Image (cartoon, rainbow, N blue to C red):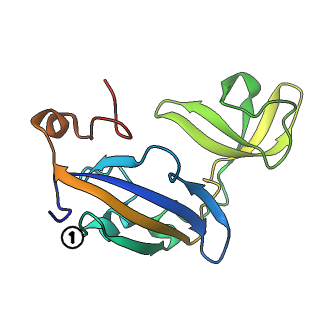
Amino acid sequence: MNIEKNSVVSFHYRLSEVGGEELESTHGDEPSLYLHGYQNIMPGLEQAMLSKAEGDIFSATLAPAQAYGERRENAKQRVSLKHLANKPKGKLKPGDIVGLNTAEGVKQATVVKVGLKNVDVDNNHPLAGKSIQFDIEILSVREASGEELEHGHAHGVGGHQH
């Protein structure tokens, strides 16, 4: 079965900046699972998955616009330390990646400057403005269940659990 709209896809990936070291991998852990056609993964990666099949191994290079977007110079802001989520252990320092609690959920930001009660952050994703490469291995492709289609996401290990 080829990947198309309403397919549930299980896959392993390695993510790297083009020409750089590996940044993230699912190998050695649970595979990722998503419902194709529902914007559950970045658009460029979803497009690269279209028509692939179980057992396919391939690479997809995504330009910034297809991945984490272009860098926005006006994306810096001062935030109260109490609004940070999943911050690193120890004292914060410039370059640390933190989570910001927002109305849309937790968003990643990079610490620029640390104050006593506030922190200045860059709201660009750490990979914004960079071309990235995914090395993909498709493990399985199946039709989505009615419940998955109704919810708009895959269920099960690597997908969304209820």
Q: Residue shown at 56%/72% (left/top)?
A: 131
The 10 Å Cα crowd at callout 1, few under 14, some 14 to 19, many 20 or more, is few
Q: Nearer the viewer, residue 54 or 3?
A: 54
Q: Quadrant of residue 78?
A: top right
> Can you identify the residue that label 1 sits on?
51
Would you place residue 58 above or below residue 35 in this image? below
Q: In the rendered image of this protein, does residue 4 appear above or below residue 114? A: below
- Note whether 53 is above or below 109 in the view shown: below
Considering every residue shown, the one lying at the far left of the view is 146
Residue 93 in the image, given as x and y percentages of width and height: 86, 41
Measuring from the top left, give residue 112's x and y in whole percent.
80, 47
Seen in the image, is 29 located left or right of residue 32? right
Can you name the residue that lies furthest to the bottom here? 19
Q: Amino acid at mark 1?
A: Ser
Number of numbered labels in the structure image: 1
The quadrant where residue 82 appears: top right
Choose between 46 and 139: the one closer to the eye.
139
Secondary structure beneath label 1? loop
- The location of residue 154, given as percent across then percent down, is 27, 41
Q: Identify the residue at horizontal 21%, vertical 34% (top origin).
A: 151
Q: Say which quadrant the N terminus sits in.
A: bottom left
Residue at 73% across / 44% down in the picture?
121
User: Quick one: quadrant of the C terminus?
Assistant: top left
Camera-side residue: 74 or 17? 17
Could you say where residue 27 lies in the image, as x and y percent from the top left?
Answer: 51, 54
State left or right for residue 145 relative to residue 94.
Answer: left
